[in-house]
Image (tube, coloured by chain):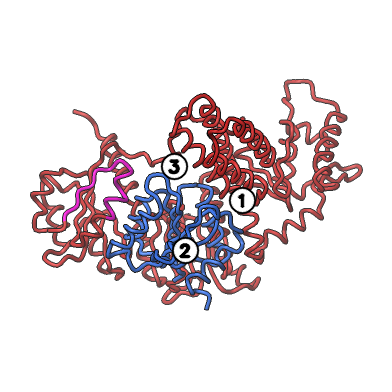
Chain colours: A blue, B red
């Protein structure tokens, strides 16, 4: 069974690019969510192996979604990688305090995304 | 569309199932040929995906038996074998297509779409030859990702060549294809001028002599381009090549959205010029931010950097009047970078976030969800409610009948394995109840044993989903079931 990634991003283009990148270059299974609510539901139902979460979501910001994922017994164990714009990257100190595996900066090179993600998640062994 | 996948490799089966489910197909999986055969006989499928090396009944024999019984549904064989004799024996058995493992999931899904289209007589999608791509549904033509503009007749001529990549068309045949027989046909020189114009446009982007002239016969695609296409569409295409092609397709498909974002950004900036509205500012910042990430990832590095500058200006010093002009100048440059086409961007009257189209189901359909796991109940409710569905969760099945009476649902989703009461018994009671025997029942189950699933169907279940649940599959099955009920209700005579 291939590893699965839940992608929570409100931008349609970005979701589709991420899906194509991860499926084609690494054969990962990608689950898509276009809003924070949909992401929270799918995380609990699909039980993905990891979550790629956009920090800047319109209705509920990424950090709130992160807290909710961590407080739900069905999702608290799932590794999370934040996807953020370089300019909006959080200070190192704040990142270290968050319960996340790492961050990926937007824009990214689609051909390198899977490699980057797998390295952060320790799936590259 | 319902697909039966018969594959004993559970990992491959799971991958295929997920990919197809995300494309709104309903997929049932069997892990040996005999079970697959039973399922094929029990249910109605639009397409069969059969692994060749199957226990109990191999894929080729399965297919042969199917055709002997005059069953005509499309069949695609999946196999690790890649020899001509294997392909021939597979196709001779009556299969419609053949995919060799390991395969690209996107290629597999595209071939499935093609097979299903063949059954429904819908025309095929993108036509390509080397770097030239023509999308008949949008009438867009690109060469190596660059958009090309053709007149209507030039476009039709190009499409004709691409649909018949090896055929030679004489000028008179071209005239027959495009000009109304009731009207005066054009001179052969007119055809010649169209060919010349197409060649000029293709030459300009590097496709030299794309149309070749066979003296005394006519025109066709230069076969050296056709050969390079054969190589490029081969299953051996590298992942990077596949990804690049997919990204080009995605940009063609989604660029209207980016253009729309540019337009919303432009409108918000114009509004900000007149009054400092916080909503407009937030909208502009959000659009600039999204454009920065999305355009940069598509490879528009300059455009992405411009969007980033706009975002920074808006956030930091927008109150300074001179920055209005600066932002406007940046917007002009951004539009140039992405070849902005206003006709593709339909401006929105408000600045609300875009949402994908929500599947249409009967308004306010009610669903009763019975599962002893409260967290699962909450998650499924959160998944279904945004679709406009009213979802009531029940984690104490002993209160089932009173809840049923008070909710009066259109669909019941039932956990098969609950601690105090069996889902199967509940299903049986519902089917024998005079008031509720019509209620559609969808089972959630950890069972993958076909005999249990078969029992559920024999007791009156309408559908089932095995846990762990795939949310996309759950959505498709719920919506399909509700649509079917709605159609049935509408077709019932009124008294």
Furthest residue toward front: B320
Question: Disc 2 and disc 1: Cα gap in Å?
Answer: 24 Å
Does residue B436 lie above or below A28 as drawn?
A: above
At horizontal 33% and vertical 58% (from top left) the residue drawn is A67
Residue pointed to by mark 3: B356
Q: Are marks 1 and 3 in contact (CB under 8 Å)?
A: no
Q: Chain of mark 1?
A: B
Please state the extent of the stretch shown in magenta in the rendering: B379-394
- In the displayed structure image, the side of residue B249 where residue A118 appears, left or right: left
Residue B234 lies, in percent from the top left, at 67, 62
Q: Chain of mark 3?
A: B
Question: Disc 1 and disc 3: Cα gap in Å?
Answer: 23 Å
Q: Chain of mark 2?
A: A
- In the displayed structure image, the side of residue A22 where residue B157 appears, left or right: right
Residue pointed to by mark 1: B296
Residue pointed to by mark 2: A29
In which quadrant of the rendered image does the C terminus of chain B lie? Answer: top left
Q: Nearer the viewer, residue A27 or A68?
A: A68
Furthest residue toward right: B215
* Residues flagged by tags 3 and 2 on a common chain: no
Q: Residues within 10 Å of mark 3 (few under 14, many from 20)?
A: few
Whether residue B95 appears in this view of the structure is no
Does residue B91 lie above or below B216 as drawn?
A: below
Q: SS class of the residue under badge 2?
A: strand
- In the displayed structure image, the side of residue B276 where residue B302 appears, left or right: right
Q: Residues within 10 Å of mark 1 (few under 14, many from 20)?
A: many
Precedes in sequence: disc 1 or disc 3 = 1
Eye-nearest disc, 1 or 3: 1
At horizontal 85% and vertical 41% (from top left) the residue drawn is B218
């Amino acid at each position: 069974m291939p590893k699965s990634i839940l992608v929570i991003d409100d931008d349609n283009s970005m979701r589709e690019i991420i899906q194509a990148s991860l499926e084609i270059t690494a054969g990962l299974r990608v689950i898509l969510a276009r809003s924070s609510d949909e992401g929270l539901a799918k995380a609990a139902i699909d039980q993905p192996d990891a979550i790629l979460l956009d920090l800047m979501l319109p209705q509920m910001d990424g950090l709130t979604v992160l807290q909710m994922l961590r407080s739900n017994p069905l999702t608290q164990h799932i590794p999370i990688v934040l996807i953020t714009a370089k300019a909006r990257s959080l200070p190192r100190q704040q990142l270290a305090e968050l319960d996340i595996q790492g961050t990926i900066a937007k824009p990214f090179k689609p051909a390198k995304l899977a490699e980057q993600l797998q390295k952060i998640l320790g799936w590259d062994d | 569309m319902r697909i039966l996948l018969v594959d004993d490799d559970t990992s491959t089966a799971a991958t295929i199932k997920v990919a197809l489910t995300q494309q709104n197909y309903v997929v049932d999986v069997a892990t040996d040929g005999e079970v697959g055969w039973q399922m094929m006989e029990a249910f109605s499928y639009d397409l069969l995906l059969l692994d060749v090396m199957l226990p109990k009944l191999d894929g080729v024999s399965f297919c042969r038996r199917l055709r002997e019984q005059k069953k005509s549904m499309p069949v695609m064989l999946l196999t690790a074998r890649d020899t001509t004799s294997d392909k021939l024996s597979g196709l001779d058995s009556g299969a419609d297509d053949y995919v060799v493992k390991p395969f690209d999931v996107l290629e597999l899904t595209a071939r499935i779409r093609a097979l299903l289209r063949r059954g429904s007589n819908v025309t095929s999608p993108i036509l390509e030859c080397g770097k030239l791509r023509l999308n008949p549904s949008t009438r867009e033509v690109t060469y190596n990702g660059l958009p090309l503009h053709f007149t209507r007749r030039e476009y039709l001529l190009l499409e004709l060549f691409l649909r018949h990549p090896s055929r030679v068309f004489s000028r008179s045949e071209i005239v027959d294809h495009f000009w109304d027989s009731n009207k005066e046909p054009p001179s052969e020189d007119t055809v010649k001028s169209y060919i010349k114009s197409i060649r000029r446009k293709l030459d300009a982007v590097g496709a030299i002599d794309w149309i070749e002239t066979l003296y005394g016969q006519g025109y066709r695609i230069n076969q050296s381009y056709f050969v390079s296409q054969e190589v490029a569409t081969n299953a051996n295409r590298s992942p990077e090549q596949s990804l690049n092609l997919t990204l080009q397709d995605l940009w063609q498909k989604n660029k209207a959205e980016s253009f729309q974002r540019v337009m919303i950004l432009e409108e918000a900036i114009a509004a900000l010029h007149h009054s400092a509205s916080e909503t407009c500012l937030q909208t502009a910042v959000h659009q600039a931010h999204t454009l920065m990430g999305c355009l940069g990832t598509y490879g528009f590095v300059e455009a992405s950097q411009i969007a980033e500058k706009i975002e920074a200006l808006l956030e930091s010093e927008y109150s300074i009047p001179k920055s209005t002009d600066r932002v406007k100048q940046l917007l002009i440059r951004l539009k140039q970078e992405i070849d902005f086409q206003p006709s593709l961007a339909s401006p929105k009257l408000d600045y609300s976030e875009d949402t994908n189209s929500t599947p249409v189901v009967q308004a306010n359909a009610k669903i009763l969800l019975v599962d002893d796991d409260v967290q699962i109940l909450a998650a499924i409710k959160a998944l279904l409610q945004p679709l406009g569905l009213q979802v009531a969760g029940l984690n104490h099945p002993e209160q089932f009948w009173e809840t049923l009476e008070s909710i009066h649902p259109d669909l019941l989703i039932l956990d098969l394995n609950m601690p105090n009461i069996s889902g199967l018994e509940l299903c049986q009671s519902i089917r024998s109840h005079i008031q509720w025997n019509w209620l559609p029942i969808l089972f959630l189950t950890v069972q993958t044993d076909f005999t249990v699933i078969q029992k559920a169907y024999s007791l009156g279940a309408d559908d089932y989903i095995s846990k762990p649940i795939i949310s996309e599959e759950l959505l498709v099955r719920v919506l399909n079931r509700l649509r079917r009920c709605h159609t049935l209700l509408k077709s019932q005579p009124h008294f």
